[in-house]
């Protein structure tokens, strides 16, 4: 569905900007009018493009921690019997994120105008994703909103914990990589030119590694702006390609094939699949719709494609475990556990159990990530050091030939 960036005046006359999805430009304008807004500008945001509104959202995103705290507080107040209007008013006042405060104020206004809870939340996809809205809708419809909010808070906490652990475990390799790149840049900029001056006094032919290093140094020093533009341009092209469905699928497929990180990505995806599907199914959402939501929020297009294929198979009469067996990213442990859950009528419990199993495997892999990456880092560092040493010291080792026997 197309996205539109808008600037509007709200009921109090304040200027509000943001982005939202709608079928057409006219539908977006009508949607804003129904909310009591006066549209000033509304334009479609092209995929991969940047707008002032999108930049604002990227600099003011709602963190998982803020969303988790909000959901827990929402659950506590709802469980205490506080009215929805009072809940939203209270939480919007104490929210740390400005974006979250603005979203809650508009949600409160929409609900006061007769909108359903999930419909009001769905108007803010950058804050509350499809998973959040779908679980709210299921909980609201089934009359188990209290339980749904509790499950949502736990789910957000688990996801945030996994992401934090991965970031923490990859910090050391990132530091090593940055130091290595910095060292190479310093050598290219300051050290190699001095060797070039020294070798320039002699007419002897320099070894090939030294010639390559001197040429590279000259290019970097003289045409650094071209090098910088090439790096930035490559990054922009990568982002634009990844914004396409084909590019996202191909890159996400490669992520499952990387050494060390490939298996880790599979375990993270399986853990997320189990947790999310269990929470949605437990909330009363039909299995095909639950799988559709999982595919939307799983975060990997290659894995999402298999989830959609499972959904299609279920709609044709297959069981979940049988459909999973036909795919490549679901391990025998997950398939067998799912089959047991289907036979015993405790599918949500079995999905949660296998998700917890993969979460433990993820934690174990993350704890040993540095050990697993050490061989790769050592090979990389040794390769760079060897090339630099050969380029710098090979002429010195052959000094008798380079200086003409002096």
Image (cartoon, rainbow, N blue to C red):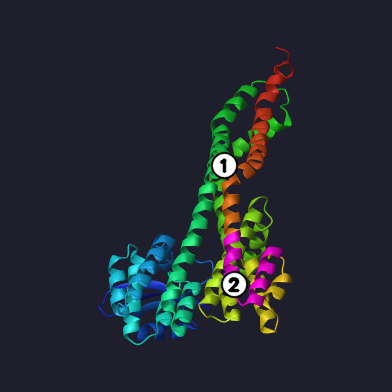
Residue 284 location in percent, x, y?
52, 80
Left or right? Give the position of 40 relative to 238.
Answer: left
Residue 209 lies, with reference to residue 400, above or below; the image says: below
Report the front residue among 36 and 40: 36
Report the front residue among 104 and 148: 148
Which is nearer the N-term, disc 1 or disc 2? 1
Give me the C-alpha separation between circle 1 and circle 2. 33 Å
Report the front residue among 160 and 31: 160
- Secondary-structure class at tag 1: helix
Does residue 241 appear anywhere in the picture? no
Q: Residue at x 66, y 42 (%)?
A: 376
Magenta residues span 332-357
By secondary structure, the bulk of the magenta-drawn segment is best described as helix
Does residue 263 appear anywhere in the picture? yes
**Quarter in which the C terminus is drawn:** top right
Q: Residue at x 36, y 85 (%)?
A: 33
Please tell me whether mark 1 or mark 2 is closer to you in this view: 2
Res. 248 mark: none
Res. 295 mark: 2
**To which residue does mark 1 refer?**
177
Q: Residue at x 28, y 76 (%)?
A: 86
- Secondary-structure class at tag 2: helix
């Amino acid at each position: 569905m197309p996205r539109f960036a808008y600037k509007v005046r709200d009921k109090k006359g304040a200027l509000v900007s943001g982005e939202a999805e709608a079928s057409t430009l006219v539908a977006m304008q009508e949607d804003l009018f129904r909310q009591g807004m006066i549209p000033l500008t509304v334009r479609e945001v092209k995929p991969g493009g940047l707008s002032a509104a999108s930049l604002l959202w990227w600099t003011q995103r709602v963190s998982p921690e803020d969303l988790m705290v909000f959901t827990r507080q929402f659950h506590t107040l709802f469980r205490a019997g506080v009215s929805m209007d009072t809940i939203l008013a209270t939480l919007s006042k104490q929210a740390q994120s400005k974006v979250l405060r603005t979203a809650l104020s508009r949600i409160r206004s929409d609900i006061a105008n007769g909108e359903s809870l999930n419909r009001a939340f769905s108007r803010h996809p950058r804050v509350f994703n499809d998973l959040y809205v779908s679980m709210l809708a299921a909980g609201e419809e089934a009359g188990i909103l209290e339980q749904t909010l509790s499950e949502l808070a736990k789910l957000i906490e688990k996801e945030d914990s996994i992401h934090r652990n991965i970031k923490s475990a990859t910090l050391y390799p990132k530091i090593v990589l940055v130091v290595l790149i910095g060292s190479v840049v310093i050598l290219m900029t300051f050290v190699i030119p001095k060797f070039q001056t020294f070798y320039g006094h002699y007419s002897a032919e320099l070894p090939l590694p030294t010639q390559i290093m001197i040429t590279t140094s000259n290019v970097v020093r003289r045409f650094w702006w071209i090098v910088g533009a090439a790096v930035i341009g490559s990054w922009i092209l990568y982002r634009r390609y990844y914004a396409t469905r084909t590019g996202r699928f191909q890159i996400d497929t490669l992520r499952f094939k990387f050494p060390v990180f490939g298996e880790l990505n599979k375990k993270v995806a399986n853990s997320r699949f189990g947790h999310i599907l269990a929470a949605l199914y437990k909330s009363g959402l039909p299995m095909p719709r639950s799988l559709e939501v999982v595919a939307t929020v799983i975060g990997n297009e290659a894995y999402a494609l298999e989830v959609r294929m499972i959904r299609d198979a279920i709609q044709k009469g297959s069981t979940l475990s049988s459909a999973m067996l036909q795919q490549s990213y679901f391990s025998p442990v997950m398939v067998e556990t799912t089959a047991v859950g289907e036979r015993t009528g405790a599918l949500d419990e079995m999905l949660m159990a296998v998700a917890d199993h993969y979460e433990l495997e993820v934690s174990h892999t993350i704890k040993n990530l540095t050990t697993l990456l050490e061989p790769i880092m050592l090979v990389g560092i040794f390769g760079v050091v060897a090339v630099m040493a050969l380029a710098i010291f090979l002429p010195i080792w052959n000094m008798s030939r380079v200086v003409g026997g002096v």
